[in-house]
Amino acid sequence: DDDTADAGGNGGGDDVISIGFSQVGAESGWRAANTKSIQDTLTAENGFDLSFSDAQQKQENQIQAIRSYIAQGVDVIAFSPVVESGWDAVLEEAKDAGIPVILTDRAVDSEDESLYESFIGSDFVLEGETAGEWVSENLATEPINVVELQGTTGAAPAIDRKAGFEEATSDNPNVTIIDSQTGNFTRSEGKTVMEGFLQAHDDIDLVYAHNDDMGLGAIEAIEAAGLVPGEDIKIVTVDAVKDGMQALADGKINFIVECNPLLGPDLAEIAKKVVAGEEVEKRIVVEDQSFTQEQAVEALPTREY
Ligand code: GYE
Protein backbone atom coordinates (compact mmCIF):
# COMPACT_ATOMS: atom_id res chain seq x y z
CA ASP A 1 0.00 0.00 0.00
CA ASP A 2 2.99 2.31 0.19
CA ASP A 3 4.45 1.80 -3.25
CA THR A 4 2.09 2.21 -6.14
CA ALA A 5 4.92 2.39 -8.68
CA ASP A 6 4.91 4.76 -11.59
CA ALA A 7 4.76 8.27 -10.24
CA GLY A 8 6.59 9.10 -13.45
CA GLY A 9 10.02 10.65 -13.83
CA ASN A 10 11.07 10.70 -10.17
CA GLY A 11 14.42 10.97 -8.53
CA GLY A 12 13.85 8.34 -5.87
CA GLY A 13 15.01 5.36 -7.92
CA ASP A 14 13.06 2.15 -7.84
CA ASP A 15 12.52 0.42 -4.55
CA VAL A 16 12.91 -3.13 -5.76
CA ILE A 17 15.03 -5.05 -3.26
CA SER A 18 17.64 -7.32 -4.77
CA ILE A 19 18.23 -10.31 -2.54
CA GLY A 20 20.60 -13.25 -2.89
CA PHE A 21 19.45 -16.43 -1.14
CA SER A 22 21.77 -19.40 -0.65
CA GLN A 23 19.70 -22.48 0.16
CA VAL A 24 21.15 -25.57 1.88
CA GLY A 25 20.03 -28.05 -0.77
CA ALA A 26 17.03 -30.17 -1.69
CA GLU A 27 17.56 -32.91 0.88
CA SER A 28 14.07 -33.23 2.34
CA GLY A 29 10.37 -32.50 2.12
CA TRP A 30 10.95 -29.76 4.67
CA ARG A 31 13.52 -28.14 2.42
CA ALA A 32 11.21 -28.30 -0.60
CA ALA A 33 8.44 -26.55 1.36
CA ASN A 34 10.93 -23.96 2.65
CA THR A 35 12.24 -23.22 -0.86
CA LYS A 36 8.70 -22.87 -2.19
CA SER A 37 7.79 -20.46 0.61
CA ILE A 38 10.83 -18.29 -0.15
CA GLN A 39 10.33 -18.31 -3.92
CA ASP A 40 6.58 -17.66 -3.60
CA THR A 41 7.15 -14.70 -1.27
CA LEU A 42 10.22 -12.93 -2.63
CA THR A 43 8.57 -12.16 -5.96
CA ALA A 44 8.71 -9.17 -8.29
CA GLU A 45 5.10 -8.48 -7.32
CA ASN A 46 6.16 -8.14 -3.71
CA GLY A 47 9.04 -5.83 -4.63
CA PHE A 48 11.91 -8.31 -4.75
CA ASP A 49 14.47 -9.38 -7.31
CA LEU A 50 15.52 -12.81 -6.01
CA SER A 51 18.70 -14.65 -6.94
CA PHE A 52 18.38 -18.19 -5.58
CA SER A 53 21.03 -20.89 -5.40
CA ASP A 54 21.13 -24.47 -4.11
CA ALA A 55 24.35 -25.46 -2.31
CA GLN A 56 23.74 -29.22 -2.41
CA GLN A 57 24.50 -29.47 1.31
CA LYS A 58 28.07 -28.16 0.82
CA GLN A 59 29.41 -25.23 2.82
CA GLU A 60 31.98 -24.36 0.13
CA ASN A 61 29.15 -23.90 -2.38
CA GLN A 62 27.35 -21.59 0.03
CA ILE A 63 30.46 -19.51 0.62
CA GLN A 64 30.92 -19.24 -3.15
CA ALA A 65 27.30 -18.18 -3.64
CA ILE A 66 27.57 -15.55 -0.90
CA ARG A 67 30.77 -14.18 -2.46
CA SER A 68 29.04 -13.88 -5.82
CA TYR A 69 26.11 -12.02 -4.21
CA ILE A 70 28.64 -9.64 -2.64
CA ALA A 71 30.28 -9.13 -6.04
CA GLN A 72 26.86 -8.45 -7.60
CA GLY A 73 26.20 -5.85 -4.94
CA VAL A 74 22.77 -7.11 -3.92
CA ASP A 75 20.80 -5.15 -1.31
CA VAL A 76 20.45 -8.11 1.08
CA ILE A 77 21.98 -11.57 1.46
CA ALA A 78 20.00 -14.32 3.16
CA PHE A 79 21.01 -17.90 3.73
CA SER A 80 20.37 -21.03 5.71
CA PRO A 81 23.82 -22.16 6.89
CA VAL A 82 24.33 -25.86 6.24
CA VAL A 83 26.63 -26.18 9.29
CA GLU A 84 27.06 -23.90 12.30
CA SER A 85 30.73 -23.01 12.16
CA GLY A 86 33.17 -21.46 9.72
CA TRP A 87 31.21 -18.39 8.57
CA ASP A 88 33.07 -15.49 10.12
CA ALA A 89 35.36 -14.72 7.16
CA VAL A 90 32.67 -14.53 4.51
CA LEU A 91 30.30 -12.67 6.84
CA GLU A 92 33.07 -10.11 7.45
CA GLU A 93 33.35 -9.69 3.68
CA ALA A 94 29.62 -8.96 3.43
CA LYS A 95 29.85 -6.52 6.33
CA ASP A 96 32.81 -4.72 4.74
CA ALA A 97 30.80 -4.42 1.53
CA GLY A 98 27.93 -2.90 3.52
CA ILE A 99 25.51 -5.71 2.64
CA PRO A 100 23.20 -6.81 5.45
CA VAL A 101 22.83 -10.56 6.08
CA ILE A 102 19.73 -12.34 7.36
CA LEU A 103 19.93 -15.93 8.60
CA THR A 104 16.96 -18.19 8.07
CA ASP A 105 16.25 -21.64 9.49
CA ARG A 106 19.72 -22.59 10.83
CA ALA A 107 22.07 -20.68 13.13
CA VAL A 108 25.77 -19.86 12.92
CA ASP A 109 28.01 -20.13 15.99
CA SER A 110 29.79 -16.80 15.38
CA GLU A 111 30.61 -14.91 18.57
CA ASP A 112 30.19 -11.60 16.76
CA GLU A 113 26.46 -10.97 16.43
CA SER A 114 27.06 -7.84 14.38
CA LEU A 115 27.85 -10.13 11.42
CA TYR A 116 24.13 -10.61 10.77
CA GLU A 117 20.96 -8.57 11.26
CA SER A 118 18.50 -11.21 12.30
CA PHE A 119 18.01 -14.96 12.64
CA ILE A 120 14.57 -16.35 11.78
CA GLY A 121 13.92 -19.97 12.68
CA SER A 122 12.65 -22.61 15.08
CA ASP A 123 14.07 -23.53 18.49
CA PHE A 124 15.65 -26.89 17.66
CA VAL A 125 16.62 -27.68 21.26
CA LEU A 126 12.98 -27.31 22.24
CA GLU A 127 11.98 -29.63 19.38
CA GLY A 128 14.37 -32.30 20.67
CA GLU A 129 13.06 -31.82 24.20
CA THR A 130 9.46 -32.16 23.06
CA ALA A 131 10.33 -35.45 21.34
CA GLY A 132 12.24 -36.68 24.41
CA GLU A 133 9.48 -35.75 26.84
CA TRP A 134 6.87 -37.60 24.79
CA VAL A 135 9.08 -40.69 24.61
CA SER A 136 9.84 -40.55 28.30
CA GLU A 137 6.18 -40.25 29.28
CA ASN A 138 4.57 -42.52 26.71
CA LEU A 139 7.06 -45.23 25.78
CA ALA A 140 9.72 -45.39 28.47
CA THR A 141 7.50 -46.65 31.26
CA GLU A 142 9.63 -49.78 30.81
CA PRO A 143 13.24 -50.06 29.54
CA ILE A 144 13.64 -49.13 25.85
CA ASN A 145 16.57 -49.20 23.44
CA VAL A 146 16.73 -46.19 21.15
CA VAL A 147 18.61 -45.74 17.88
CA GLU A 148 19.08 -42.19 16.66
CA LEU A 149 19.23 -40.99 13.05
CA GLN A 150 21.07 -37.70 13.23
CA GLY A 151 20.81 -34.85 10.76
CA THR A 152 23.77 -33.48 8.84
CA THR A 153 26.90 -33.49 11.00
CA GLY A 154 27.62 -30.02 12.35
CA ALA A 155 24.20 -28.60 11.39
CA ALA A 156 22.36 -26.64 14.08
CA PRO A 157 19.22 -28.83 13.94
CA ALA A 158 21.30 -32.01 14.29
CA ILE A 159 23.32 -30.69 17.24
CA ASP A 160 20.31 -29.16 18.98
CA ARG A 161 17.76 -31.94 18.41
CA LYS A 162 20.26 -34.44 19.79
CA ALA A 163 21.01 -32.30 22.84
CA GLY A 164 17.33 -31.56 23.53
CA PHE A 165 16.31 -35.22 23.35
CA GLU A 166 19.17 -36.33 25.61
CA GLU A 167 18.37 -33.60 28.11
CA ALA A 168 14.68 -34.49 28.27
CA THR A 169 15.31 -38.23 28.68
CA SER A 170 18.34 -38.00 30.99
CA ASP A 171 16.28 -38.34 34.15
CA ASN A 172 14.54 -41.50 32.90
CA PRO A 173 16.76 -44.56 33.49
CA ASN A 174 14.52 -46.60 31.13
CA VAL A 175 15.85 -44.75 28.06
CA THR A 176 19.09 -46.08 26.55
CA ILE A 177 20.44 -44.71 23.28
CA ILE A 178 22.25 -47.76 21.91
CA ASP A 179 23.38 -46.31 18.57
CA SER A 180 23.45 -42.93 16.82
CA GLN A 181 24.61 -42.04 13.31
CA THR A 182 24.04 -39.37 10.72
CA GLY A 183 21.60 -39.99 7.88
CA ASN A 184 22.23 -36.51 6.47
CA PHE A 185 18.52 -35.58 6.63
CA THR A 186 17.76 -37.70 3.52
CA ARG A 187 15.37 -40.59 3.02
CA SER A 188 17.94 -42.78 1.25
CA GLU A 189 20.61 -42.38 3.92
CA GLY A 190 18.02 -42.85 6.64
CA LYS A 191 17.18 -46.18 5.07
CA THR A 192 20.81 -47.29 4.69
CA VAL A 193 21.76 -46.35 8.23
CA MET A 194 18.65 -48.08 9.61
CA GLU A 195 19.57 -51.25 7.69
CA GLY A 196 22.93 -51.17 9.48
CA PHE A 197 21.25 -50.63 12.86
CA LEU A 198 18.96 -53.60 12.25
CA GLN A 199 21.92 -55.81 11.39
CA ALA A 200 23.89 -54.72 14.43
CA HIS A 201 21.09 -54.86 17.02
CA ASP A 202 18.18 -57.24 17.51
CA ASP A 203 16.67 -55.31 20.39
CA ILE A 204 15.67 -51.91 18.94
CA ASP A 205 12.48 -50.48 20.45
CA LEU A 206 12.51 -46.94 19.06
CA VAL A 207 13.96 -44.86 16.23
CA TYR A 208 14.42 -41.19 17.00
CA ALA A 209 15.00 -39.48 13.63
CA HIS A 210 15.98 -35.81 13.40
CA ASN A 211 13.60 -35.40 10.43
CA ASP A 212 10.62 -37.07 8.78
CA ASP A 213 12.54 -38.11 5.67
CA MET A 214 15.05 -40.21 7.60
CA GLY A 215 12.14 -41.71 9.54
CA LEU A 216 10.45 -42.58 6.23
CA GLY A 217 13.68 -44.24 5.06
CA ALA A 218 13.78 -46.18 8.35
CA ILE A 219 10.21 -47.38 7.73
CA GLU A 220 11.36 -48.95 4.44
CA ALA A 221 14.27 -50.70 6.17
CA ILE A 222 12.06 -51.96 9.02
CA GLU A 223 9.43 -53.31 6.62
CA ALA A 224 12.11 -54.97 4.48
CA ALA A 225 13.32 -56.73 7.63
CA GLY A 226 9.83 -58.16 8.13
CA LEU A 227 8.97 -55.95 11.09
CA VAL A 228 6.06 -53.55 11.60
CA PRO A 229 7.02 -49.86 11.93
CA GLY A 230 5.03 -48.06 14.61
CA GLU A 231 4.47 -51.34 16.47
CA ASP A 232 7.50 -53.68 16.60
CA ILE A 233 9.73 -50.65 16.36
CA LYS A 234 8.29 -47.26 17.30
CA ILE A 235 9.33 -44.10 15.44
CA VAL A 236 9.50 -40.46 16.55
CA THR A 237 10.56 -37.72 14.13
CA VAL A 238 10.73 -33.94 13.64
CA ASP A 239 9.24 -31.75 10.82
CA ALA A 240 5.59 -32.78 10.27
CA VAL A 241 5.69 -32.41 6.48
CA LYS A 242 2.97 -34.10 4.40
CA ASP A 243 4.61 -37.51 3.90
CA GLY A 244 5.58 -37.69 7.56
CA MET A 245 2.07 -36.73 8.70
CA GLN A 246 0.57 -39.34 6.37
CA ALA A 247 2.82 -42.06 7.87
CA LEU A 248 1.84 -40.84 11.35
CA ALA A 249 -1.86 -41.00 10.46
CA ASP A 250 -1.26 -44.50 9.02
CA GLY A 251 0.26 -45.65 12.31
CA LYS A 252 3.80 -46.17 10.98
CA ILE A 253 5.22 -43.23 12.92
CA ASN A 254 4.20 -42.69 16.56
CA PHE A 255 4.83 -38.99 17.22
CA ILE A 256 6.09 -35.97 15.26
CA VAL A 257 7.36 -32.63 16.51
CA GLU A 258 6.60 -29.90 13.99
CA CYS A 259 9.18 -27.59 12.44
CA ASN A 260 7.49 -24.90 10.39
CA PRO A 261 9.27 -24.36 7.03
CA LEU A 262 7.17 -21.38 5.87
CA LEU A 263 9.80 -18.73 6.54
CA GLY A 264 9.28 -16.66 3.36
CA PRO A 265 6.85 -14.07 4.80
CA ASP A 266 9.04 -13.31 7.85
CA LEU A 267 12.12 -13.07 5.64
CA ALA A 268 10.36 -10.63 3.29
CA GLU A 269 9.27 -8.44 6.18
CA ILE A 270 12.69 -8.37 7.85
CA ALA A 271 14.46 -7.72 4.52
CA LYS A 272 12.21 -4.71 3.84
CA LYS A 273 12.85 -3.29 7.29
CA VAL A 274 16.61 -3.81 7.09
CA VAL A 275 16.80 -2.06 3.71
CA ALA A 276 14.67 0.80 5.08
CA GLY A 277 17.14 1.18 7.93
CA GLU A 278 14.61 0.16 10.58
CA GLU A 279 15.43 -1.78 13.73
CA VAL A 280 14.74 -5.50 13.53
CA GLU A 281 14.59 -8.23 16.13
CA LYS A 282 17.86 -10.13 16.36
CA ARG A 283 16.06 -13.43 16.89
CA ILE A 284 12.64 -14.41 15.57
CA VAL A 285 11.56 -17.75 16.99
CA VAL A 286 9.11 -19.70 14.87
CA GLU A 287 6.44 -21.48 16.95
CA ASP A 288 5.98 -25.22 16.48
CA GLN A 289 3.36 -27.78 17.54
CA SER A 290 3.55 -31.55 17.88
CA PHE A 291 1.27 -34.35 16.69
CA THR A 292 0.10 -37.74 17.91
CA GLN A 293 -1.40 -40.24 15.45
CA GLU A 294 -4.96 -39.09 16.22
CA GLN A 295 -3.99 -35.43 15.84
CA ALA A 296 -2.36 -36.19 12.48
CA VAL A 297 -5.57 -37.73 11.17
CA GLU A 298 -7.39 -34.53 12.10
CA ALA A 299 -4.76 -32.10 10.84
CA LEU A 300 -3.90 -33.73 7.50
CA PRO A 301 -6.79 -32.47 5.35
CA THR A 302 -5.97 -28.81 5.99
CA ARG A 303 -2.18 -29.09 6.19
CA GLU A 304 -0.36 -26.50 4.04
CA TYR A 305 2.88 -28.41 3.56
O1 GYE B 1 14.29 -30.39 9.81
C1 GYE B 1 15.24 -31.10 7.76
C2 GYE B 1 15.99 -30.31 6.75
O2 GYE B 1 17.15 -27.09 8.96
C3 GYE B 1 15.11 -27.32 10.11
O3 GYE B 1 16.72 -29.37 7.50
C4 GYE B 1 15.90 -27.68 8.92
C5 GYE B 1 16.07 -29.17 8.71
C6 GYE B 1 14.79 -29.96 8.60
O4 GYE B 1 16.71 -31.06 5.90
O5 GYE B 1 14.23 -31.85 7.19
Image (cartoon, rainbow, N blue to C red):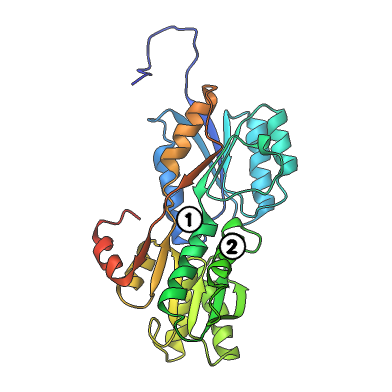
Residues 131 and 65: in front is: 131
- Residue appearing at x 57%, y 32% in the figure: 76
- Please provide percent x and percent y for residue 25: 55, 55
Q: CA distance from mark 1 to mark 2?
A: 15 Å
Q: Which residue is mark 1?
A: 31
Residue plotted at (50% across, 58% down): 126
The answer to which quarter of the image holds residue 103 is top right
Kindly indicate the quadrant of the structure image that contains residue 194: bottom right
Q: Position of residue 139 (x, y in %)?
A: 43, 80
Q: Estimate how packed mark 1 is, as few (under 14), some (14 to 19) or many (20 or more) residues with alpha carbons within 10 Å.
A: some
Residue 192, can we see it? no
Percent x, y of residue 130: 46, 64
Furthest-right residue in this view = 89
Tell me: 9 left or right of 118.
Answer: left
Q: Is mark 1 within 8 Å of ligand 1?
A: yes
Locate the C terminus and report the quarter of the image it occupies: bottom left
**Marks 1 and 2: CB-CB under 8 Å?**
no
275 lies above or below 253: above
- According to the picture, the residue beneath numbered tag 2 turns out to be 158
Please tell me which residue is depicted at 54% across the width and 58% down the height of the picture.
125
The image quarter containing residue 92 is top right
